[in-house]
Amino acid sequence: MRQAAQRYYTYFINGDAKQYVEGMADSQNFTEDYSMQMQDVITHASKELSKRGRIVRVEALSDSLYTADSTAYVFLDLVYADSVHEQVGVQMAFQQGCWRIK
C-alpha cells in the first residue's frame, strides 16, 4: 500500500492526472465525463501545489491498516527542492486486488 500511495502521489505532483484518476477507488465506475472532470480538478490542484516549490521526492513514512473495511491511511513525506519537508496523509482502499487512492 505504501508503494501505491507513493506512485499515485507522484502522478499527482507530476501533473499526470489521467494516471492518478485511473488509480482512484471506484474509478472503473466513473463515466467518461466524470473522469474528465476529475482530471481537470487534479490538474488544477497539482498546479496549485507546484506554486509552493518543486517536490523532488515522495517517501512513505508509515501507515495504518483497517482490516474491517479494507482501507488504509498512508503518511507521506514530501521533500521540496529547498530541502523543506511536508507530511501529508493519503487514504487508500483495497479494490480488485490492488490498493487505490481515495
Image (cartoon, rainbow, N blue to C red):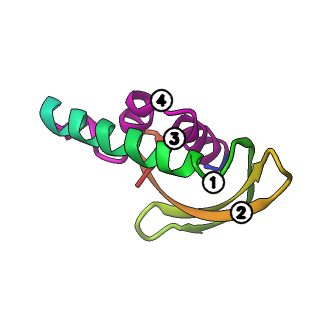
Spatial CA distance of label 4 from label 3 is 6 Å
In this rendering, which labeled residue sits more in front, label 1 or label 2? 1
Q: Is residue 4 visible?
A: yes
Q: Going 80% across and 44% down the picture, which residue do you hit? A: 81
Find out whether residue 15 is within the magenta segment: yes
Magenta span: 3-30
Q: Amino acid at mark 2?
A: Glu
For label 1, the residue is 52
Q: Earlier in the sequence, mark 2 or mark 3?
A: 3
In this rendering, which labeled residue sits more in front, label 4 or label 1? 1
Find out whether residue 76 is within the magenta segment: no
Q: For the residue carrying disc 4, how many other residues have a C-alpha within 10 Å: few (<14), some (14-19), or many (20+)?
A: some
Label annotation for residue 86 = 2
Q: Amino acid at mark 3?
A: Phe
SS at mark 1 in the image: loop
Q: Is residue 65 above or below residue 44?
A: below
Label annotation for residue 12 = 3
The reply to whether callout 4 and callout 3 are in contact (CB within 8 Å) is yes
Q: Position of residue 76 (x, y in %)?
A: 68, 57
3 left or right of 57?
Answer: left
Q: Going 54% across and 40% down the picture, which residue do you hit? A: 8
Q: Earlier in the sequence, mark 4 or mark 1?
A: 4
For label 4, the residue is 16
Q: Position of residue 91 (x, y in %)?
A: 49, 61
Q: Amino acid at mark 4?
A: Asp
